[in-house]
Amino acid sequence: MQHYTFADFLAKFPPVPMPVTLGEDTHHVFSTENEPLPDGMIVQFIHPTEQTVADDEFTEYVPCFALEDTERFLALVWWKASLLNYEYVLATFTPKGELIERRVIAQTQVLSTGRIRRSVATIDEDWVIFIAEGESADAEDHFDPTTSRTYDIEILADGTIG
């Protein structure tokens, strides 16, 4: 398997200005602009403690973007597509490439009940991430109000997500 540098990995994530909204269909933009990550990068930077890619052959990772103007850390977002589960993952790294923290910030997931759990996220200029989530019956586009909630998290100056 080819060895990649952290700079190679970073080059896959174009910097974009905030705000950015990540929703159910946003991945189409990223998929047309960015190639899926090769297995070697997934092993080295997404699953570094495992010897092989931890996912099945149907799972792919598409780099989305890097947050601009971070100083003590690097923040990257990728889209993970697997069977019945699609996730936008925010990960922060030290400048040397060491993982600080990783978190799913938006997703579409088909539950065993046949319902769909969805969440959308907006990252603003101050690195605050506003998340709205809820469930809907299969193929319905509106949230069930009894399962809906909104909250926010933020990327702190040291790269932790809280």
Image (spheres, rainbow, N blue to C red):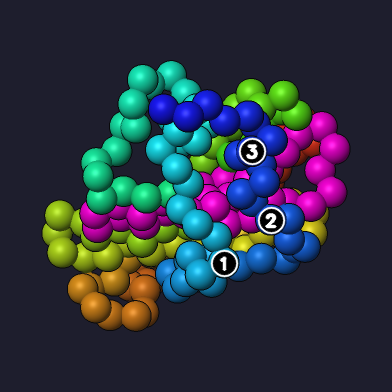
Residue located 64% across and 38% down the image: 8
- Where is 92 relative to 122, above or below? above
Where residue 143 appears, as percent x and y from the top left, is 36, 74
Residue located 79% across and 52% down the image: 68
Q: Which residue is mark 1?
A: 33
> Which amino acid lies under the numbered mark 1 shown in the image of this protein?
Glu
Q: Judge depth for marks 3 and 2 and give the one in front.
A: 3
Q: Which residue is mark 2?
A: 14
Where residue 11 appears, as percent x and y from the top left, is 67, 46
Where residue 54 appears, as percent x and y from the top left, is 31, 32
Q: Residues within 10 Å of mark 2 (few under 14, many from 20)?
A: some
In this rendering, does residue 132 appear at all? no
The span shown in magenta is 62-90
- Secondary structure beneath dot 3 equals helix
Q: Which residue is mark 3?
A: 8
Rendered image quadrant of residue 22: bottom right
